Image (cartoon, rainbow, N blue to C red):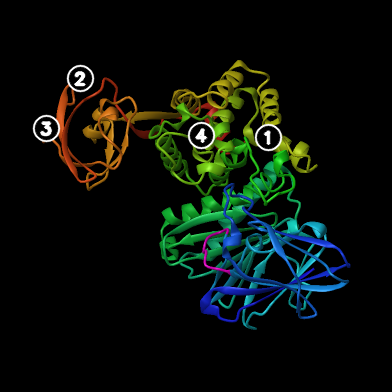
Amino acid sequence: MHYHISRKSICSQYIQIKLLISCHQGEPIHLQLAAWRPGRYELTNYAQKIRGFQVKLENKPVYWYKKTKDLWFFTATETGEYQIDYEFYCNQMDAGGCWSDDRQLYLNFSNFVFEVKEKSASPISVSMDIPEDYQVATALPENGQGIWEASGYQHLMDSPFLAAAGLQHQSYSIQSHTFHLWFHGDIHFDMPTLIEDFKAFTEKQIMAFGEFPAENYHFIFQLLPYRHYHGVEHAYSTVITYGPAEALKEKAARDELMGVSSHELYHFWNVCRIRPKELCTYNLATETYLDTGLVLEGVTSYMGDLFLLQSGYFSKTDYLKILQKQIQKEADHEGWKNLNIQESSFDLWLDGYKPGIPDRKVSIYNRGALIALCLDIILLPEGACLSAVMKKMWDVFGRTKMGYHIQDFYEMLKSASNNSTAFVDFWDQYVVGKGDLLVPLSKLLDKIGIAIIQEVHENEFLHNYGIRKDEEGKVLQVHQEADAYGKIMINDLIVDVPSELQSKSGNSITIGLERLGRKLNTSIQSGEKRFYPLIKLQETGSSQFGEIWEKGQ
């Protein structure tokens, strides 16, 4: 099979696609377009961006029809090479989309190439009409004549492609492996320093897993002039979109870029190769339900930041700032009362990548990272660590391509902890159960010389009455245990608040509201507990386990 991609009108953002397939007479052909892409477990329905679909044989139209919203079908009337023509709209600039303009052609093939059901494992070649001065960043092998080769659909759809005139290329080597850095956009940082920092965390990750089964790996960066932050993992590459590019003059922005880069490289092992059994072969036509979000994204989020600490890029202070933000997010929401992390993982297809209704779920990224941190500390007294468990996951399930279930991860952790009661109780209460994670976090962080301090003195309205509002007075959140929970609605506009707040428990105040154009007053009482505490982390001094955790075993 062969794809040819061209652009008749660059500013229209449509690309023209021609697919050539050799068929036998009477052969049925099913053309399945992806409904989602690896790394983001939500339906995207890429078929909505296709137009002008037609099938021809020797320039004569062939009858076709759709069996579903994204499955096209025709029968070969005679032996020959069939041509499928269609257009795809490339107007999504993020790490998983496609974009076409006067400066670049950026493609994620998962968005628009077909899985030809009858020929899924057949080799696929791709050619493109691109200007002669364009450079190309992709992990796809090129045959030297402007044609890129994929071993099959799964290979092609997992290999993003960026062609542009202004690409900047750098690289570094570790042992026999070459890591390519491709940048499209303005550079506002010291490149040699960045390369050394990348090399440091890459070496740490390779050391942790014991090997890197690839000769080449590609970091493909879109540095944008506006605010953006996104990364997507692939088998031999990652695309990372970041902006504004000018912000990278400052360390805070570079910390974000380094964080997502370390995260995506860790996915080379965890997700791209250490996969749940459900993902051992991607079926992109329909939802694939998973209860392993803790491992997929929680462990990756935690380990990505930890390797930046252990490689020396993050100071302890830098790392604690990130951890403090994660714990603050955990303290600000109570979705854990309704869905545990496994249930939230299963429900990714509903609302996993948006806020959703109040306090319904937890984040597999944020809560997952904090659970991973707790598991790591629990293992320390046993002379073990989470990184070593993931190395065993690689040996047993990743290298062998067997795939795992969540129970397999549990059993490996249980074995590493010598069946400790501490581990089993934690798993039962905070992975399978619906416990308040701040309780064990405080105790476990104390073991590595870090204290959680909860402060409630800066915002009495928030902490005493449980109401979070923006600067205009719009209600954003109401704590479920606050008296206001039964009296104030999200999106109410608070227009009148007493100048003196009666913060003593049980005291009441009357506030004025505007609700959908109506004016009303309501009385609310302050609570016995203090709501939405502000989280501060503080080092308490060196500790035996803290030094082991910080340096790595």
Secondary structure category for the residue under label 4: helix
> Front-most of 432 and 21?
21
Which tag is nearer the camera, tag 1 or tag 3? 3
Which tag is nearer the camera, tag 2 or tag 4? 2
Measuring from the top left, give residue 444's x and y in whole percent.
Answer: 50, 25
Q: Report the disc number at residue 506.
A: 2
User: Of callouts 1 and 3, which one flags the residue occurring earlier in the amino acid sequence?
Assistant: 1
Which tag is nearer the camera, tag 2 or tag 3? 2
**Three-letter code, disc 1:** Ala
Secondary structure category for the residue under label 1: helix
Any part of residue 112 in sight: yes
User: Of callouts 2 and 1, which one flags the residue occurring earlier in the amino acid sequence?
Assistant: 1
Residue at left 17%, top 22%? Answer: 507
In the rendered structure, the answer to whether residue 324 lies left or right of residue 492 reads: right
Which tag is nearer the camera, tag 4 or tag 1? 4
Q: Report the disc number at residue 370.
A: 4
